[in-house]
Amino acid sequence: MAGHGNHCSFVLLAEFHILEGAQLKYQFPQPLGVDEGVLAMSMLPDGAETQLDDWTIFFLNQTPLNTISPVLALESPEVKSVGLPGEDTAGDKPELLCVLNLVRTKHDKSLDRGAQVLALAICTRHPFIQIFKPFLLLALDDYLLDPSQDCLARLFDAVNSMDLSAAPNLTRHEKLVMRSSERKDIFAEKFAHITAQQSWVMGNSTSVTKTASQHKSTNSNDSYSSFEEGILFRNKEREKHQDDGRNRRRENQHVKERTEFENMAHSQFPHGQNSPSDSSFSLGGSAVWVGDESGLDLSYKERGDASSVTSLTANSTLVGSTRNRRSTDASSISSHAQGREHSYRLPHSQQNFPDPQKRHGIVKDTHFYHTTVAYKEYHLPINMPLSTFPEEVGDYSLITLIKTFSVHPVVSGPVHPHLHTNGPQTHPIIVLFNALVTGKRIIFLGHKRPAGLVSNFVLSACALGSGCGAVLRGFTERAFPYANLKNRDEWEAVPAYIAGVTNPIFGTSRQWDLFLDISTGSVMVSKDIHSNYPTQATVGLAGPIIARSGTLKAESSLGSEDEISRMTKEGSKTDLSKDNNADKMFIEDIRTAIEDHFGESLVRMRFTEYVTRFVRLASRYEEEITGTTTFGFPSVPFTEVLGRPPKLGSGIAFSDEATCLKELAANAHRIEAWRKTTSYRYLVLDCAKYHTNSSIKGFDVLHQLFRLRYTKNMSDSEALTIMKSLADGVKTYDQVVELLASLPHGGGLMYLGFSLFHQKEAIREYTVSLFNQLRAYPVGVLFLQALNHFQRYAYVRQAHAKERKMVLVAAENYQQHPQITENVYGKNAMVGNQPNGAF
């Protein structure tokens, strides 16, 4: 992430002249070296005079005609040549420049046409171009008052004065974890270096923070519950009656010696990994208390109340939940609960985070980096999104895209196997996705609609095809969010272009394969689709054709195009267009979520999962056809051979073989078409780099999570091998984040948490070990907090039991070899206690 400068490469201003048409008036700090007429027409769209304000977006460095060549060489990274990972330098090309353009119509009766049409644009390499909109609004107002190039210079300097050097630079997995969580304190530890004087930190006084936390009104999504205070807090009156007789029976010399050792062991435990009852779970947050947990009996009296519960930081708030009263809101805390807070606070408790990371100290969303930039006398607040991928440009909306093109459930035009994976019943959004990944020419028409609206649809389509930027790439480089007649030859020459237009003349040109009308919500396939993309015979994928060795019998291929056409038209007689088609069920789930008012983040994560699954399915298909795959894991089941250690499965998993055959058959044509695109070549390069840099080695995490989630009759041996591999292979921070990024959206650790109830003790122990390792990091704590009460209770109970067992074993060793044990756990031990159990 760049600090000062390099945010804005150029500033452009265009104006419509009544006699000369669209004219590019200023280019600052120097000319771009691109045809000025093309730039002016891109900045002043058709029908701009009908809109008071309009936003358009277009790209530079896509084609030879719009590639910049400034007179003075720039050292900024956005114009130097960069290539794909693994490519030779001969294939290098300039990085894409995003152009955000503001068009304004100022009505003035004194002018010849009664109005003045201006456009002001900035060129930047950042995909989150929406953060620059306030600059353009103020700068254009400034220019209307003082029409000179000085206004462009002030805008250029103001944008480049923006300091983003303190913004966290997240990895791919961290971005996925961030966008999958709605918590506004996710990765708060990455803001530790930001001082309390900055705008995103609340107040300077601890007393003010504490008062605010006691009266703060929260909802279930924003509650910052500590992990297990509630599970460990006991009813004092019940505790007294239960412990009176128990303590008398245990007062013997052996217990006294054991207790004496426990105090030493807890203060000097070798790994610095404290039990779930220590202060590492408070995190300055609100505790959720389950009032009566009679099933938990760990003999806390031997250790004392203070050592058996989670310490609370100075500003934490305890929320009570008893049989007669349940509350999860800090604002409704009772005086009785407040009394418990003081009774159960450890005398030597310490805060785990500095002030900027306190859960109640954060008043703004950590999904964004918050800063301010001065423009003249204004201080503009800037909220830079931290989880944006390069293929996600602007503030697009998948919900708007889906709603618009779900009006007509049937796509008009011919049925083509590349596009219609469910026959004629294929949903328009699935047809659009198939057109994107198979490299078809796509046009969005918005007749008499703002050009900015058309641009957003194109950008949404790019995000749709790429899995919201997290899976595939190569879409924005062939996207023209606003295209016109002036540069028609340029963008129509780009293979598989994605263009947005406002002129209906493009609908009659037939230089497209898929035509989407924003005004009517209709989707049309070109009548020439079969001649432009003739369907080739594919290897059959039905019934016994697939050999489990990973290869296919060549003699069982589908023969002619007539057979393919007949199979497509008679979809009702095949499995390709049944109601249980995977694509159909997926899009119905998405539509239901939208109708139930779920947000944009959920829809985006679901499409990320959908594209990920498509890629894994393509890997399986490629393996079946060629015997190997150039990306992804090989598709093998779990194997267990007598005398050898069991081997985990990998690759995409299905509930049964029949479902696998049906999916491969339904997707064979679009996968074959996708394998010929640039997007496929990019993925092969990216996957090689991904597997090299992956933190979790040796097994396919997604496969194991799928098996745990969907398998009905999993053997104990497979479950044990999965949990053991996760417990042994997920220990470092990068490994923890990679696992969390692989979890299904909305499910979190729930499916792993079910292993806490497995009948086999070893599986339960490995699950506890895995959760203990997640608990070593703040992000892992947040996911553990999201477990339901049953799983949280089971984890805490088993974690304490495991620790108790370890302490008893250590106590016996101490009695047998006291001198050796003192040396191991003595003051000179190399590993000490760390916040959150980190080591």
Image (tube, rainbow, N blue to C red):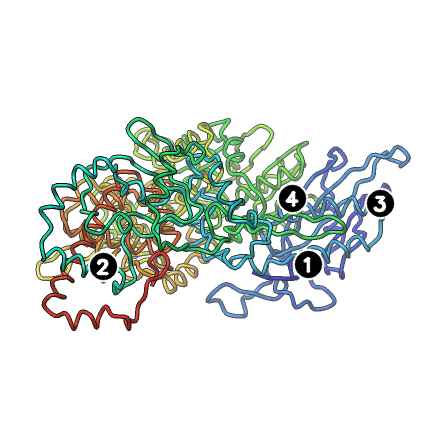
Residue type indicated by callout 4: Tyr
User: Mark 3 — residue?
Assistant: 145
> Is residue 661 at all visible to an observer of this figure?
no
702 lies left or right of 525: left
User: Mark 1 — residue?
Assistant: 161
731 lies left or right of 673: left
Which residue is nearer to you in this view: 74 or 529?
74
User: Mark 2 — residue?
Assistant: 263
Residue type indicated by callout 1: Ser
Camera-near label (2 vs 1) is 2
| Image x and y of residue 285, in percent | 41, 45
Gap between marks 4 and 2, in whole Å? 70 Å
Q: Is residue 647 above or below residue 134?
A: below
Task: Please tell me whether mark 2 sits on a helix, a strand or a loop.
Answer: helix
Task: Please tell me whether mark 4 sits on a helix, a strand or a loop.
Answer: loop
Q: Is residue 519 above or below residue 318?
A: above
Which residue is nearer to you in this view: 325 or 651?
325
Residue type indicated by callout 3: Leu
325 lies left or right of 685: left
Task: Please tell me whether mark 1 sits on a helix, a strand or a loop.
Answer: loop
Camera-near label (4 vs 1) is 1
User: Mark 4 — residue?
Assistant: 482
Camera-near label (4 vs 2) is 2
Q: Is residue 77 above or below residue 282?
A: below
> Is residue 563 at all visible to an observer of this figure?
yes
Does the CB distance between marks 3 and 4 fall below 8 Å? no
Which residue is nearer to you in this view: 619 or 710?
710
Does the CB distance between marks 3 and 2 fall below 8 Å? no
| Image x and y of residue 208, in percent | 53, 44
